[in-house]
Image (spheres, coloured by chain):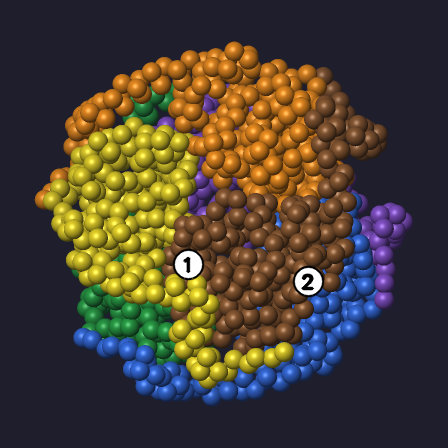
Chain colours: A brown, B yellow, C orange, D green, E blue, F purple
Amino acid sequence: MTLNQLGVVKRSIVRADPAAVEKLSKFGVATIHEAMGRVGLMKPYMRPIYSGARICGTAVTILLQPGDNWMMHVAAEQLQPGDVAVAACTTDNFDGFFGDLLATSFQARGARGLIIDAGVRDVEELEKMGFPVFSRAIHAKGTIKATLGSVNIPVICAGTLVNPGDVVIADADGIVVVPAAVAWEVADAAEKRESFEGEKRAKFAAGVLGLDLYSMREPLEKAGLKYID
Amino acid sequence: MTLNQLGVVKRSIVRADPAAVEKLSKFGVATIHEAMGRVGLMKPYMRPIYSGARICGTAVTILLQPGDNWMMHVAAEQLQPGDVAVAACTTDNFDGFFGDLLATSFQARGARGLIIDAGVRDVEELEKMGFPVFSRAIHAKGTIKATLGSVNIPVICAGTLVNPGDVVIADADGIVVVPAAVAWEVADAAEKRESFEGEKRAKFAAGVLGLDLYSMREPLEKAGLKYID
Amino acid sequence: MTLNQLGVVKRSIVRADPAAVEKLSKFGVATIHEAMGRVGLMKPYMRPIYSGARICGTAVTILLQPGDNWMMHVAAEQLQPGDVAVAACTTDNFDGFFGDLLATSFQARGARGLIIDAGVRDVEELEKMGFPVFSRAIHAKGTIKATLGSVNIPVICAGTLVNPGDVVIADADGIVVVPAAVAWEVADAAEKRESFEGEKRAKFAAGVLGLDLYSMREPLEKAGLKYID
Amino acid sequence: MTLNQLGVVKRSIVRADPAAVEKLSKFGVATIHEAMGRVGLMKPYMRPIYSGARICGTAVTILLQPGDNWMMHVAAEQLQPGDVAVAACTTDNFDGFFGDLLATSFQARGARGLIIDAGVRDVEELEKMGFPVFSRAIHAKGTIKATLGSVNIPVICAGTLVNPGDVVIADADGIVVVPAAVAWEVADAAEKRESFEGEKRAKFAAGVLGLDLYSMREPLEKAGLKYID
Amino acid sequence: MTLNQLGVVKRSIVRADPAAVEKLSKFGVATIHEAMGRVGLMKPYMRPIYSGARICGTAVTILLQPGDNWMMHVAAEQLQPGDVAVAACTTDNFDGFFGDLLATSFQARGARGLIIDAGVRDVEELEKMGFPVFSRAIHAKGTIKATLGSVNIPVICAGTLVNPGDVVIADADGIVVVPAAVAWEVADAAEKRESFEGEKRAKFAAGVLGLDLYSMREPLEKAGLKYID
Amino acid sequence: MTLNQLGVVKRSIVRADPAAVEKLSKFGVATIHEAMGRVGLMKPYMRPIYSGARICGTAVTILLQPGDNWMMHVAAEQLQPGDVAVAACTTDNFDGFFGDLLATSFQARGARGLIIDAGVRDVEELEKMGFPVFSRAIHAKGTIKATLGSVNIPVICAGTLVNPGDVVIADADGIVVVPAAVAWEVADAAEKRESFEGEKRAKFAAGVLGLDLYSMREPLEKAGLKYID
């Protein structure tokens, strides 16, 4: 499958192992991003449409044309329980490509949410339905159904490459994409990282300084830091 | 009345029929925008200052000068119960032109809220007062009272023309302006549109795909969509 | 201390009188800004990471390098109860320089919050901890610890000069900086201003117009305002 | 003709008097804007695609759909010698709606240039052809021909209302729209204003200060200006 | 090679056939983008640092860390005659990562230019040297050399995936990336497309309308377009 | 003099030594910024209004109110030969505060140019006059003369503190502010830095790599850089 190819729907995709997805769902986006070596984040202009929204699932990717949501309907058929729809557009566009009717359809298919590098609408209804969406804009502007995009090709969404089947995790801190092939590895690394955090948090709470906990005083002095009064 | 004329207050304006306003208040912005033929929306940078804010009323328009809210006080006198103040500025400006004192005055006049293509302040107090505002910015920066703008002339607010007396509806999806002359027509079209939505929603919830509900499979094939494995 | 000097930590700073800080904490940012003569505000792109966040305290300033939060740890040691960390960066950068671990450390030191002209992460945890942050962005992107900035030098944060020891007040309307030397003077002026507001509010609520309350009708007429029908 | 009505082409429009257009072409945008009473300017994000571009002519208006330039071809037929194409879009869109082929067609019709609140391409060829364009963006991204917009309805372009037949003047300072009905009046006012400027310029060049030329010293003192050493 | 992997330099990359690169260099970005099926464009915020800049060559990719240009020096060694350096950053950053010294080094290696999704400096010297750069920003701000990025891994630059060896073409209309594997195919399609353009241009210049040239009158009528007077 | 104090004109300011200014005028902004230790730069949104613009002189500072250029006229009287006017505004504002008449006045006073964190107009005339301006925007929108700002107080312009008398240098790479007290020291450091650059440039031109010139191979290896094929 080529990036950005138009007019194609791929039906058989390799989804990340559901158990690895389940394990990843227990960690925050910041932790997973660190566990992957500080890569895989979408741009911070992507925001949840309601407070507390959180998604973790396997990507079904959608490439949209500006002002046109035809491919959303094509994508609905490809969604399976545990999937997350991830929609990019061939150009910057803030129209409302998605609303409560499509959300009802996606939810009926078992989808866990939508990540869209464009606009959505009906956001109050989406919150009532408990259908989490992370988007670039909220806009009542409707779309047409006239031009082909694609479903389940690699797409670039908010600055990050997403392959169909990748694990996508979204929370209040942002959105991270974990390639399906490394889902277990990243989940394990996140677990390890988080296990260290509890201990560190206790020390910080007790008044220990990062300067001492991380032995920074010497390297800071070597770097030339001067204390004055 | 000319667009953007400075130094004028029009006292007698033709407001949309209150019953039509009442009927429009029952529909969401996205629905009304569709019912009008996908026109009349303000730019999506306009956002409610608190979650759940919603306005529907007849426009009293205000043209402000940058950093100057003198015309807000002039406008207060022209507000009648059921009105919405709609403020534009002669240039892009993010100052806080409006706060809790003016809101108290506007509310005492029966105004239902404010749409302002600029900044506001005292947003916590405004929420406590239940005075909804949709704005471009929140900014504590105060303004002076030195230069004339106008009241009740046609203005362009957030990319859309607003004539005094037009119906303005604002909710979480955005803001739409319905010309007074077509208020009934649009309200009826919105009602009709919404009546179809319930049925569609039920079908989507039952698992029917948009591909089938809207008979899209044939046009998609004609457009050249290819399914691959 | 020079603005923007790199590689320096000043240990002894002159903090504003705690009683003046206490008094300032009772007023809103918009009121304090007016009381200072409409100066001292940060840019409105700074926003609270959670609804209801509010900070008032004395500034410990931090100058960061892009993608590097080393100085956060250096700053922690300089924080005293009642302080607010105020972080600027040598260039525009949206990375997440601060999360729940540093917040635990800052909170253990008695800090009241963070103002940062850059990004933060772990925002749900920060809300749970009750550690208020006002920032330019929310971003899961982590940072390194490799380059020296400074602590407690004058910095420009979101367009405003902040000297260590200044009072910084942040609420839903924005952020204002009160130089330590005028903290009492500004607090008194804010008190005076607010005492007038109650009376005005009552008059507005009773239907008195600003046109009459502020005797604007004559100056408006002199300026040439025309009423037409 | 209603603002934003879709699917309509108005063939007979009332163009401003060519002699008034000719007279207006002699003045700069800043001068005309002042002569109209400081109204009628488009937003400053509109920029010429090449240095030295300048346009003055009567508007043929175009309402485009996002990513779709079908109406450009419809508009070509309505262009007459002396016209300027003025294109708005139903939503923010930066695609390249216009290139050298359409420019060849527009030029063959006698059009003097294009004002477009969206993107264009082939900018080097356009410069070689001497076909001036003012746009919001330069983008190689192509468009389709699938959805109806309109031609010669009132449109809002870059924040300003443009009626078909209005005079549109664009130079390095920006773009101003003069309603057809006041073209002569504004041209005369611009002439008068400019006649004063030469004299003022001579005085400034001779070292006379604005403080004295405009008798500002007394009002400044009254306003409270303090000189200190 | 994985996208965004840190700390890696790939020495052997498969460059597109030089003859195909040579052929592609004869066409404009808009034409190539159309010939590829309207994909492969970078975002339009990328602009040439001087008028008339134009690049066509094979990509050596660079992943930078914010405020750090260490990898630029590592990349220099990998550059071969005919290459274009294509630099992305792990986060949005506008610092000046590149100036006349690095340009001298790159030019000595035979590089044809730089595409950078960040800032550059010494732009007047770069123009004098005839070293074309397309960037997101011009900024005198210098960078450090402390953290590893990578060279010749797949990167996302200005919204588009670039693999080392791909053909990158940049001109006044934007930047397009042609995967090495399809370089010949795209070059041939561009040639074909351009051969049609001359004929069309002649017809447009002779006054033929697109409405007739493309037989649009009937589909416009079917779509419901109404002509009124 | 306090930052942002309103209604004040300071007549006697301490300008940097003219000989140091003269020496600084020989170096580029990037070099001076490095010589100062990478501080003192304005934000990169400031751009010259014409290609080739360059300024070096001592600052006369101006604090403007939004939409009001009264203080420009007050400042004119304070300008001396060799000065640069540096204008900030109390809020973000893009209006055209300055045009050819004021430029004529400033030029008659011996001013070398204008740096303004707002908009200007008459840009073609300014280029013809050879009066260089660096601004945030070009906008034909005029301003009024109604509210007091200040002249020769410390201001924050485009993110950087400017004290009256400081040396301000602007070229195609940006704008840097050198405090008057360190003008000689910075000029000397810039000279030293530039003397090294010629030698480095020659080595780069001869094909020497930065990896070798700066002995980076060992630290890169220590940092973990891996070369693969």
Would residue C126 be found to the left or right of residue A132 on screen? right
Q: Nearer the viewer, residue D67 or C220?
A: D67
Counting from the top left corner in percent of width and height, residue B166 is at 21, 51
Residue lying at 18% horizontally and 75% vertically, measured from the top left: E229
Q: Is A84 displayed left or right of E206 in the figure?
A: right
- Left or right of B225? Residue B196 is left
- Labelled disc at residue A100: 1
Give me the C-alpha separation between circle 2 and circle 1: 28 Å
Packing grade of label 1 (10 A; few <14, some 14-19, many >=20) is many
Asked whether residue F103 is in view, the answer is: no
- The residue singled out by tag 2 in the image is A16
Image position, residue C69 (x, y; %): 69, 37
Q: Give x and y (percent) for residue A2.
A: 64, 73
| Mark positioned earlier in the residue sequence (2 or 1) | 2
The reply to whether residue E191 is visible in this rendering is yes
Q: Residue at x 41, y 27 (%)?
A: C30
